[in-house]
Amino acid sequence: MPIDKAVILSAGKGSRLLPLTADRPKCLIELNGKSLLEWQLDALASSGVREVVVVTGFRDELVDAVAAARQGVRTLFNPFYHVADNLGSVWMARGEFGSGTLLLNGDTLVSPALLAKVQAAEGAAITVTVDEKADYDADDMKVLRNGTRLLRIGKALEPGAYNAESIGLLAFRGEGGRLFIDEVERMMRTPEGTRRWFLRAIDALAADHEIQTVSIKGEEWQEVDFPEDVEKARSLTARWAKAL
């Protein structure tokens, strides 16, 4: 059965995109007639997702307005978005992870075909969506796999100790959500908790639990983190808009 609920982490300001994000959050950057968030919501709906929780922070009222215009979409405000990394946003949404939940970064464009592939990859409690390429840079969230099993995940993995990158989309089924949130709770109780990425929790879980990956190599997606990414995202969504 396809997962019908998603959590989108959209609390950050997107400082690396200033001045574009001076008065609006990164998720509301306009891309060919729709915001990044609206492209995400449309893609999720096409894959069977009927309930979406958007974790907000910077200029939350603007995101609230987008959510209010959509059936099945609601927001959850993260009051410490400016002092905590995205582990804090996951902690704020800890009550939203049931037996089936997708988790998506708010700056990642994904195609309906990509989401269909993730939805079809059933069987694992936790599945991390990965792409493969010839070279990886310092900002990539690198992944080491053995077959489809995830062994390590992190930006600082040693050179050569990785063979894929996380695109910022995870699927939780069965007990996966509980395992993940239990680890998030543990990490948030440490002095470093508010400065951690949520994928650090996945890296910790991989030591004792089987976490699977699904490769979406060849499918279309785009992270929007730097000014040059905005132009790539506009080119990508222009193709998508033309195909509608």
Image (cartoon, grey):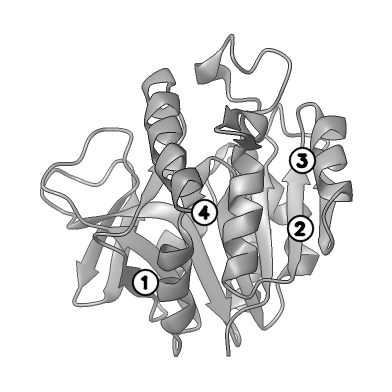
- Please rate how many residues cluster around mark 1, counting C-alpha atoms within 10 Å: few if below 14, some from 14 to 19, many from 20: few
Classify residue 98 as left or right of residue 161. right
Point out the tag, 4 or 3, that comes first from the N-terminus.
Answer: 3
For disc 3, the marked residue is 56
Q: Is residue 204 visible?
A: no
The label shown at residue 184 is: none
Q: Secondary structure at mark 4?
A: loop
Residue in front for this viewpoint, 219 or 122 = 219
Q: Position of residue 79 (x, y in %)?
A: 83, 36
Instruction: Tell me if mark 2 has few (under 14), some (14-19) or many (20+) residues whose alpha carbon lies within 10 angstroms of its own.
Output: many
Q: Are marks 1 and 2 in contact (CB under 8 Å)?
A: no
Q: Which mark, by number, is residue 207?
A: 1
Measured Cα–Cα span from mark 1 to mark 2: 29 Å
In the image, what residue occupies the spot 25% across and 47% down? Answer: 157
Q: In the rendered structure, which amino acid carries the disc numbered 1?
A: Ala
Residue 97 vs 125, above or below: the answer is above
Residue 178 pos. (x, y %): 65, 77
Residue 145 position by quadrant? bottom left
Residue that carries the numbered disc 4 in the rendered image: 244
Q: Residue at x 26, y 77 (%)?
A: 148
Closest to the observer: 122 or 110? 110
Distance in Å between CA atoms under marks 4 and 2 = 26 Å
* Residue under pointer 2: 53
How far apart in space, not on screen, are marks 4 and 1 (Cα)? 43 Å
CA separation in Å, label 2 and label 3: 9 Å
Q: Amino acid at mark 4?
A: Leu
The Cα atoms of the two marked residues, 1 and 3, are separated by 31 Å
Which amino acid type corresponds to the residue marked 2 in the rendered image? Val
Upstream in sequence: badge 1 or badge 2: 2
